[in-house]
Amino acid sequence: MQRVAEAHLKLRDYVEAERDRIIESLFEWLRIPSISAHPDRTDDVRRSAQFTAQLLREADLENVEILETQGAPSVYGDWLHAGPDAPTALVYGHHDVQPVDPLDQWMSPPFEPVMVDGECRARGAIDDKGQVLYEIEAVRGLLRTEGSLPVNVKFVVEGEEEVGSPNFEDLLWRESDRLRCDAVVASDTGMWSRHVPSICVGMRGLVAFDIKVRTGTIDLHSGVFGGAVPNPAHVIADLVAALHDDEHRVTLPGFYDDVRALTPEEQASLDALPFDEQKWMASAGVRRLEGEKGRTVLEQTWTRPTCDVVGISVGYTGAGIKTIVPAEGNVKISFRLVPDQEPAKVTESFLAWLEDRVPDGIEVDVRPEGPGVAPALTPVDHPAVGALRRAIGRVWGKEPLFTREGGSGPEEALGRVLEAPVLFLGVGLPGDRFHAPNERMVMDQFWKGLLAAGELWGELARG
Ligand SMILES: [Zn+2]
């Protein structure tokens, strides 16, 4: 305990002494327009990878290497001298950024970082260069002040997270020996608010389908044929209507069977979050709420599986009217999944459900959009979550609450391929404008993130 407190103080001193240099490093990195979505920025993404490698080397990490993929490069580095009995943590983040348009909405140019009112404003400030940098600086600070770390640490910093990590899982399989770890620390997420620190412990998964419905060979005259022939718009509408019951529950047989109940601790933490429904509705731009009966908005969006129609196209939708019975239509349907639902099982159940419902003589062609994404969950009672909780609690001076996120990122693949719990140490705030103009990092959060990263190593070592 004494040693942990000392390390904390030393890291605070380090931050005081190195503050200006760290900010200058951040600015230099943010000036590289590493937009992975733009083919003409390929060189910049590579330059950003090289800069990442340099940061890792300057932090005294070893075996620093650019890991090539079919797309943009990732960067690796490690420090493995904590001894064979010490746990090994793998820090994950990414060095690519989102595109910047609409450019005219930026108050200052996206790749010319500025400090305004304690905020660093630039593309990539929070997502994700800033969050990778405090992880690197925590290692650098401890190695400079203590000469060692209480755990073995590895870094993998991806170069194409913002385009959906198309090559990352391949990289994980290929490098699974090198990346082996006892815990993944993903630094690419946020907190509930500045004064309500929180830890994300789960992400929903996804399966999606593209369904073509064909009732005939050609559009027919509605005056001549209408009333006697099937209409694909009606077939699609019937299917969509049948997906939910009166209480907005999904009707696939057994859909909820594998949903893992929240532990009392996670439920209590969820209930303790200061949630403002009106504000949330305003942020969503809606005037009423719907959803599974008897569940709160946070439950509906974080801990319950859902089904949504993504789009429908059928028949004539141009100006005026056209007197037809259309011959074909299309509907896209997606399901958000929660632990322990399996994409393959839900897919099978949906296909069977469809087959049951489509009348004879109607042709239905279903194409699943990829294999789906499994939901990810780090159990709140996992010892590594306890370590993160203590680390954040000490720095923010408040016990963090548990949250989940709706999206699905490479974190699920990290946990699955490396068979390790994924810890989310993220300091982003709801107002940080991830992916939007005027993205920012609140620097107070940055410095706290740096201290918390340092604390986490000590806590993980204590087990
Ligand atoms: Zn990100």
Image: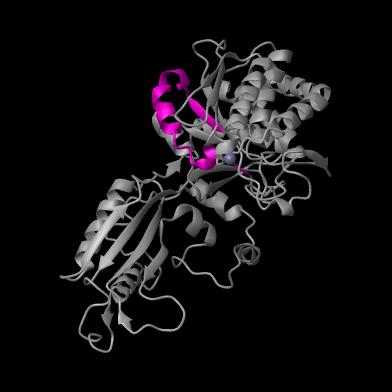
Query: Closer to the camera, 37 or 236?
Result: 37
User: Where does the image place residue 84, in percent across and percent down from the top left?
Assistant: 49, 11
Q: Is residue 162 magenta?
A: yes
Q: Please identify the quarter of the rendering in which residue 14 is found.
A: top right
How is the rendered protein coloured?
one colour
Residue 240 in magenta stretch: no
**At x 39% / y 26%, what residue is drawn?**
173
The one nearer the camera, 4 or 31, is 31
Q: Is residue 415 visible?
A: no
- Quarter of the image with the C terminus is top right
Could you tell me residue 397's position as x and y percent?
72, 38
Image check: 86 left or right of 16? Answer: left
Using the rendered view, name the quadrant where residue 131 is placed.
Answer: top right
Residue sitting at the far bottom: 223
**What residue span does the magenta drawing correspond to?**
161-190
Q: Nearer the viewer, residue 174 or 105?
A: 105
From the top left corner, tell me how far across and down residue 187 is, in percent. 59, 35
Looking at the image, residue 304 sits to the left or right of residue 434; the answer is left
For residue 351, side relative to residue 267 (left or right): left
Q: Find ligand 1 in the image and state its quadrant.
A: top right
Q: Nearer the viewer, residue 91 or 38?
A: 38
Indicate the position of residue 248 as horizontal and vertical percent values. 40, 68
Q: Is residue 162 visible?
A: yes
Residue 392's place in the image compared with 79, above or below, is below
